Every structure is written in structure tokens, then in C-alpha cells.
């Protein structure tokens, strides 16, 4: 009859009482440390005494021999000198030969004793400096944010989700068995430290070729999470062992396991098993199935690498290892493991955060912290329009990719804002992963002629009109002599023309006559918060400002409000029924005096109609705006407006180096035009349906299990897919395990698929079922049809039943011999 396996524990068996044993072990450890210290000190003292005695004896013997040799030499100089060995009796010679071994033995003893003494002292020091149990306090200020777009769609999560601590009654047995099997199969047998388990884990990992099993016990991991810092040192490992023994003496096994599950990190910002269950599966821990439990249990060893939201395949493979380990420990049968593997695990997670929206999310997270200090996880309804955001990212990226190299443009930024100040889209830079610096909100750059808005508005408020004539002539104000960009003078010009053509000498004269303090007051009234120096050159934009504050200032002219307050949050809610914050309706505010607004709008439109901003014209739509260019072409701006919104654009270089003659009417105006042309259609669609942003967001239902917001339900196959996809071939994409096939595209693999993957890298794709009744999907990127882009670039063949527009795209690629048609005739 075989002996029972000590690693296995019957399901109905009560856990052994290891408390008393653990207390005895802790006491023994104290005595051992003390005795090691005494022993090492005694050894050191004894070695010292023995060494001194040996030295004295050897010195006396050698001195006697030397004296005898000198006496013999003096009595008979010709006689041979007796050797030292011959002069000694046989017994003394033997003793002399043996005595040199004693220092060697003494040195060897010191070599052994001193490290032991040092080790004992180190262990004692680690014991005496033990931190208190539970000394690591979770920062409650690090709240999790679930972020919704203006229409209520969840598009991002930020921060650490904590969930609700689970109790023994809420813990599914298979979840506890899965954690114990993969992390610490002798959990119910050891006293907190398991040398046998450590050796077994090392062997299994070596044989298996990877990390199949951990060496630390669950108790050690719990201590590490709750009582120790993340320092990697011998001292911390020693303290971890002492604290593990102490925890085992003070807590039951079930309480240790629950404490570990409630504090462990499971990836994707989820701390604790309940938060992980809600983050990945949209349910509380109590409702987890066996395959779901196995997947979560497999995450704790490498949560960042195995988080199923980013590595579903790796998480599934690890879950299979957990199920096999559960079979080995007797927790489940092989048949139950096979059945669990056969079940489909479906994630219920928010869609992947659009890459470029992180600039906006950084701003939103900071604002949410200012608006409420309520603890717990929060859901934020933002002002972001996902369609406009995707469009803005694509427009900026395409224009900089096409012209950035030859024109020496390194960076760009864009802010789109509604008349009431709501931020609809924000691009803070070319690539968030490369640089998190937000050039729309953090970069302060000289405004150039963009600042002339405040000069002319001050003039119109003081009785001048667009028809007022000034002379474009050489001007000197003190030591300052402003010049026009073309170094020429036009003579008498109306203010409308001077503004449209951005004539510097006229703006300088206006600033001098009106007074720079009056211009500063106008700018501050429209919401400019940066420091504005009282110097004559301020009229030409020598002050450093941000794109966001200048965009809101122009929005104030469009909305006839002073100032327009920009905002990015409509509402914030937590676990309670009532919202924690709702953005207030705009308070009554003074408009621009008299007809100054009408005259200013007229001048802004003249810039686009026939001035420096002609490149911003949009067919069939009234547009006004102003260009700005700083000295040596270090900055180029364009802020324009339509009846619905204001859009600000900046391009330049982070190191303040010059571009290749890029002015505000060049690339910035082109970016504005490209964006507004497509955004107008999006805004028109928005007006045809009730805007979710206008209605107060519905509060979340009170949660009974956890205040953490549950992830939205998984999208059914026929619904929209959105995110950065994986490319299977040029006609097939994958969105987190959901396969999407493009209508009318016969996909190709190999280098064509790799080229498409590089093109789609960090760019959001939006896919919807084909309205034509086929089984395919039509996808768009930056407003363009992705299938048409692929076919027109020669990245695939069109299917026989492809729509006419896709057949035409393939024919274009054939005729131009691009892509796969390059070597064909």
C-alpha cells in the first residue's frame, strides 16, 4: 500500500494547526541567532590568544639558536657552523617541524569563524530591524478612472482598480485550489517557509524550460506585499522569512490566503482578485468559473506580461499549466481539466485606448483629481469626440509624415474646441510613446502674429473700424524698429487689409497708440493666463503662450463670451447613485463691447479669403482665422473657426530650432483645412441625433459587491470593432481575439501583411458590419476606407463580388503597377 502524498490534502480535511509550531520555530530562530553571535565572538577571542602564544614560543626558540651560533663562531672561526637543526635534540626538532602548522590552522579557523560571525550579525540586524506587519499602506489617492467619450462609449481606463475585499464565503473553492496548486502546493503543510517546495520548484522549472512554479510560499508573498518594500537584498529575504514565521503564528491559513488574494496584482491595473475578475470578465470573484479562475491564478507570477488584454494567448497557455497542476495535486480530475480547457474564455473589457488620446487623458486625470477627492474608483464622462480625435491624429500624422522631413518639422499639436469650451479633440505630439510632453497644454512658445487678435480687438473696442486707414511705413518705438516679413511697405492700408496680410508695422503702431496695458487687459479678459510683458514687441507676439489658452481666447470671440473656460469633463460618478460632479452650465458673462465682435469676425474671415490664411479655405463653409509665425521660423501657428468650433494648430521643434521657411499659412493652415473638411461631416451627423454629452450622465447603479466599475459587455460579432488591430493578412484583422474580414479583399500575407502592420501601428481603426448584406466588414482609418487604401496600394486582390469602388481601387493599382502588381503587366 503506497504512502499518502504529503503535498495532497483531502478537500474536506481541516487545515493542520501550525500556529504553535510556528511560534516554536520563531523562538528557536531567536536563540540560534544569539548563540551564533556568542560562538563567533568566542572563536575570534580564542584564535587571538593562541596566535599570540605561538608567536612568543617561536621567538624564544629562534633567539636561542642564534645566540649559540654566534658563540661557536667566536671560539673557533675556522670550525664549521652547526646547523640549527643539528643543534636541536630530536624531540625538539620534531616539535619545531610541527609548530608551524598551528598558525595555518588558526588562520583557517578565522576564515571559517569570521564569515559565520558576520552572517550571524547580519541575521541579527535583519531581525532587530523587522518592519511591522501590514506596514505597507495602499495609496488611496491612486484611484482608477474609467473614461467615457462624449457619447457614453468607454474608451480608456487609468489607474489602479482595487475592487472589494472578498471573504471566505465569497471565495470559490476552485479559485483557492488553483492559486494553491500553482503558487504553493504545500501551503497547508509548511510553517511559512518551504525548503522542499523551493527545491521542487527549481527542479520543475529547470526541466520544464520556464517558470512553471514559484519558490516563495504564499505566506512569503503576502508578507512581501503588505509589510516589505520592493528592495532586492539579502536583508529583505531574511526579514521575509522571519515575518512569514510570525504571520503563520498569528493568522489562520484561510486568512493568509484571503489576504494574499485581496492584495496581489493581476495586471491591467487590477489589485486584488475581485478587481481582476471585474477588469477582465465583468463579474465579481464569487461568480468566476474554473477556466476563468485558472487564468487569473496564472497571472500573479508575471501579471504585466500575461495580462489577457495584451497577451491572451500567453494567458491561455498559462491557464492550461494551472489546470494540469491542479490535476497533479488532486484538486480536480483530468476530465474536469479537459472540460475547462474546452470552454471558451470571453473577455469583457473596454476597448483599447486610442494611442493619441493619452495626451487628453493626462489632462483629464489631473482635472478629475482637482474636481473631487472622493475615494474609490471613478467613472468620468469626458468631452472627447472619438471620431474627431481619430481624425485629428490622422491628419497631423499624415501631414508631418509627408512634409516634416523636407521642411524640418519635428512636432505638431492640435486642439479642437466647441464654442462653449468643451475640448473635442487634442493631439499633444507626434507619438505619445516617444514623448509624453503635451505640446498643446505644456509647451510655451512665442505666439507671433497670432497675438494681433488682441491688438485689433482693442482697437475696435476703442472706436476704430476695419475701414480705418493707417500707413504701412518704417516705425521706431524707443530702440525697437519692427520690420515686415517681406521688408517692404505698402503705404496707406485699411485695418482689415493690414490684419489679413499681417502687416507688422501697423500692429506696432496700434499697440503704441492704444497702450500695451490695454492690449494685455484684452488678452487676459479672453482667458490668456501666461505672463505678458509690458513691452512694445508684445503687439507682434513676443510673449510665450500655450496652444490651449490661445484657442480658448479665439473661442471667446466666436462665442461672444469673456472668457470661455475650456473643460474636458462633463460628469464624474462613483459607486453612489448621485454624481460626484456635473459640469455647471455656463454662467452669464459679458460679451465683447459694441460691434467689436462683428468687426473682429469680419477681419478674421478676410485672413482666409485673401490674406495669409488662404490655405485654410474650406469649400462651402465660412471660415475665419489667423496665422502666426515667429522669428527664424521657429514656430508656426494657425487658429481658425467655423460656426461650430475653433481649431488651433502649432508646428515646430522641441529644441526650438528653425524650420525650413514654414509659416502659419503653410502646414498649420493645411492641417486645419484637412481636419475641418472631414470634421464638418462628423459634426453634422452629431446634430441629427441626440447628443449624449448634452444629457446628464446616468449614475451607476449602487454596487453590492464592489464599487469598481465593471467593464462593458463584450461586443457581439455584428457590432462595431475599434482599436489598434493585429494584422493576420492584408484582408483580415484581429481585435483582441475577434477576427474581422474586410469586405471585397482577398488578403495576402508575407511582406505585404508586415507593411500593413507597420502602417497601422499605434493608429485606431474603426470597423462596422457591411451594410451591403455581405459577411464582411468595412473599416475606416482617419476617415478613409481601409479596404480601398489597401487595394489602391497593391496590398491585396479584390474578390469577385467586391463593390465597384473596391474593384476600381484594384484596377488603379494594376495600372500604376504598385505593390503586388509591380512586376506584372
Image (spheres, rainbow, N blue to C red):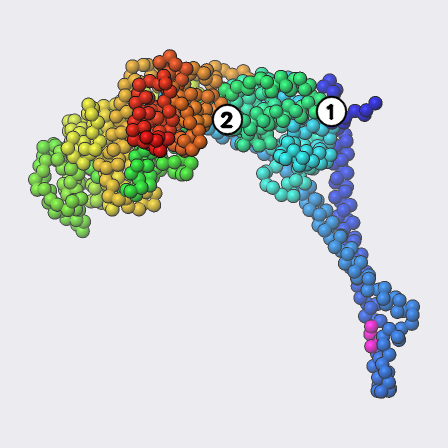
Which residue matches tag 1? 8
Quarter that holds the C terminus: top left
Q: Nearer the viewer, residue 646 or 511?
A: 646
**Is residue 490 at least partly visible in the picture?**
yes
Q: Main secondary structure of the magenta part?
A: helix
Disc 1, SS? loop
Residue 10 spot, x, y in % from top left: 74, 20
Which residue matches tag 2? 309
Magenta residues, start to end: 62-66
Q: Residue at x 26, y 36 (%)?
A: 667
Residue 310 spot, x, y in % from top left: 50, 28
Most extreme residue toward the front, as rendered? 825
Residue 158 spot, x, y in % from top left: 46, 28
Relative horizontal placement of residue 32, taking residue 224 as reference (left or right): right
Quadrant housing residue 451: top left
Label 2–label 1 contact, CB within 8 A? no
Number of labels in the image equals 2
Q: Dot 2, crowdedness within 10 Å: few (<14), some or many (≥20)?
A: many
Quadrant housing residue 52: bottom right
Q: Dot 1, crowdedness within 10 Å: few (<14), some or many (≥20)?
A: some
Q: Which mark is residue 89?
A: none
The answer to whether 288 is drawn above or below residue 110 in the figure is: above
Most extreme residue toward the top, as rendered? 773
The answer to whether 539 is drawn above or below residue 463 in the figure is: below
Q: Residue at x 65, y 43 (%)?
A: 235
- Magenta segment: does it hold 301? no
Q: Nearer the viewer, residue 711 or 219?
A: 711
Quarter that holds the N terminus: top right
Q: Residue at x 66, y 36 (%)?
A: 206
Q: Nearer the viewer, residue 42 or 428?
A: 428
* Between discs 2 and 1, the one toward the N terminus: 1
Amino acid at each position: 500500500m503506497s504512502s499518502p502524498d504529503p503535498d495532497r490534502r483531502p478537500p474536506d480535511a481541516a487545515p493542520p494547526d501550525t500556529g504553535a509550531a510556528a511560534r516554536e520555530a520563531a523562538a528557536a530562530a531567536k536563540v540560534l541567532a544569539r548563540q551564533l553571535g556568542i560562538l563567533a565572538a568566542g572563536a575570534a577571542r580564542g584564535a587571538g590568544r593562541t596566535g599570540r602564544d605561538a608567536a612568543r614560543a617561536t621567538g624564544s626558540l629562534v633567539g636561542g639558536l642564534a645566540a649559540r651560533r654566534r658563540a661557536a663562531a667566536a671560539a673557533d672561526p675556522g670550525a664549521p657552523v652547526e646547523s640549527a637543526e643539528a643543534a636541536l635534540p630530536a624531540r625538539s626538532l620534531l616539535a619545531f617541524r610541527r609548530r608551524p602548522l598551528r598558525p595555518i590552522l588558526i588562520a583557517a579557523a578565522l576564515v571559517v569563524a569570521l564569515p559565520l560571525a558576520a552572517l550571524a550579525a547580519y541575521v541579527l540586524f535583519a531581525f532587530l530591524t523587522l518592519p511591522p506587519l501590514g506596514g505597507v499602506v495602499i495609496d488611496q489617492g491612486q484611484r482608477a478612472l474609467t473614461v467615457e467619450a462624449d457619447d457614453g462609449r468607454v474608451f480608456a481606463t487609468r489607474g489602479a482598480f482595487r475592487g472589494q475585499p472578498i471573504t471566505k464565503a465569497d471565495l470559490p473553492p476552485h479559485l483557492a485550489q488553483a492559486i494553491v496548486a500553482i503558487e504553493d502546493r504545500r501551503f497547508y503543510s509548511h510553517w511559512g517557509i518551504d525548503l522542499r517546495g523551493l527545491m521542487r520548484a527549481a527542479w520543475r522549472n529547470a526541466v520544464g524550460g520556464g517558470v512553471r512554479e514559484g519558490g516563495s510560499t504564499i505566506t512569503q508573498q503576502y508578507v512581501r506585499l503588505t509589510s516589505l518594500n520592493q528592495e532586492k537584498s539579502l536583508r529583505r529575504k531574511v526579514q521575509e522569512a522571519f515575518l512569514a514565521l510570525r504571520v503563520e503564528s498569528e493568522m489562520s491559513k484561510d486568512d493568509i490566503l484571503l489576504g494574499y488574494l485581496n492584495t496581489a496584482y493581476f495586471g491591467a491595473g487590477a489589485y486584488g482578485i475581485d478587481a481582476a475578475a471585474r477588469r477582465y470578465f465583468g463579474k465579481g470573484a464569487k461568480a468566476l468559473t474554473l477556466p476563468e479562475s485558472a487564468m487569473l491564478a496564472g497571472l500573479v507570477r508575471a501579471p504585466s506580461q500575461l495580462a489577457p488584454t495584451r497577451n491572451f494567448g500567453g494567458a491561455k497557455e498559462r491557464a492550461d499549466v494551472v489546470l494540469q497542476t491542479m490535476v497533479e495535486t488532486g484538486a480536480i480530475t483530468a476530465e474536469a481539466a479537459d472540460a475547462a480547457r474546452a470552454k471558451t474564455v470571453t473577455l469583457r473589457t473596454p476597448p483599447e485606448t486610442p494611442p493619441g488620446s493619452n495626451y487628453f487623458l493626462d489632462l483629464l486625470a489631473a482635472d478629475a483629481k482637482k474636481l473631487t477627492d472622493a475615494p474609490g474608483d471613478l467613472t468620468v464622462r469626458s468631452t472627447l469626440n472619438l471620431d474627431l480625435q481619430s481624425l485629428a491624429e490622422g491628419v497631423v500624422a499624415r501631414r508631418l509624415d509627408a512634409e516634416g522631413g523636407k521642411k524640418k518639422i519635428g512636432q505638431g499639436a492640435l486642439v479642437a474646441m466647441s464654442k462653449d469650451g468643451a475640448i473635442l479633440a487634442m493631439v499633444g505630439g507626434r507619438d505619445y510613446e516617444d514623448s509624453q510632453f503635451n505640446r498643446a497644454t505644456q509647451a510655451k512658445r512665442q505666439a507671433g502674429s497670432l497675438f494681433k487678435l488682441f491688438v485689433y480687438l482693442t482697437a475696435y473696442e476703442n472706436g476704430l473700424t476695419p475701414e480705418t486707414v493707417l500707413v504701412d511705413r518704417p516705425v521706431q518705438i524707443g530702440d525697437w524698429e519692427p520690420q515686415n516679413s517681406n521688408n517692404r511697405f505698402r503705404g496707406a492700408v485699411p485695418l482689415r487689409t493690414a490684419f489679413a496680410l499681417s502687416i507688422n508695422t501697423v500692429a506696432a503702431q496700434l499697440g503704441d497708440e492704444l497702450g500695451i496695458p490695454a492690449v494685455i487687459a484684452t488678452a487676459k479678459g479672453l482667458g490668456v493666463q501666461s505672463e505678458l510683458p509690458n513691452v512694445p514687441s508684445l503687439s507682434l507676439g513676443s510673449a510665450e503662450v500655450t496652444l490651449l489658452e490661445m484657442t480658448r481666447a479665439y473661442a471667446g470671440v466666436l462665442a461672444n463670451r469673456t472668457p470661455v473656460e475650456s473643460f474636458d469633463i462633463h460628469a464624474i460618478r462613483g459607486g453612489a447613485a448621485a454624481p460626484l460632479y456635473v459640469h455647471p452650465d455656463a454662467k452669464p458673462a459679458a460679451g465683447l463691447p459694441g460691434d467689436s465682435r462683428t468687426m473682429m469676425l469680419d477681419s478674421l474671415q478676410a485672413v482666409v479669403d485673401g490674406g495669409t490664411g488662404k490655405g485654410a479655405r474650406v469649400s462651402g463653409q465660412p471660415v475665419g482665422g489667423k496665422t502666426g509665425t515667429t522669428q527664424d521660423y521657429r514656430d508656426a501657428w494657425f487658429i481658425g473657426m467655423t460656426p461650430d468650433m475653433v481649431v488651433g494648430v502649432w508646428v515646430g521643434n522641441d529644441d526650438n530650432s528653425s524650420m525650413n521657411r514654414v509659416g502659419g499659412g503653410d502646414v498649420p493652415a493645411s492641417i486645419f483645412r484637412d481636419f475641418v473638411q472631414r470634421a464638418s461631416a462628423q459634426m453634422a451627423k452629431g446634430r441629427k441625433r441626440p447628443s449624449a454629452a448634452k444629457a446628464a450622465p446616468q449614475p451607476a447603479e449602487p454596487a453590492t459587491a464592489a464599487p469598481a466599475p465593471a467593464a462593458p459587455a463584450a461586443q457581439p460579432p455584428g457590432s462595431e470593432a475599434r482599436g489598434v488591430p493585429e494584422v493576420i493578412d492584408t484582408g483580415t484583422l484581429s481585435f483582441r481575439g475577434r477576427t474581422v474580414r474586410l469586405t471585397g479583399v482577398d488578403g495576402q500575407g508575407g511582406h505585404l501583411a508586415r507593411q500593413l502592420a507597420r502602417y497601422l501601428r499605434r493608429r485606431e481603426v474603426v470597423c462596422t458590419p457591411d451594410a451591403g448584406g455581405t459577411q464582411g466588414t468595412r473599416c475606416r482609418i482617419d476617415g478613409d476606407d481601409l479596404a480601398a487604401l489597401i487595394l489602391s496600394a497593391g496590398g491585396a486582390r479584390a474578390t469577385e463580388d467586391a463593390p465597384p469602388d473596391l474593384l476600381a481601387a484594384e484596377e488603379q493599382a494594376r495600372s500604376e503597377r504598385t505593390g503586388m502588381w509591380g512586376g506584372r503587366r
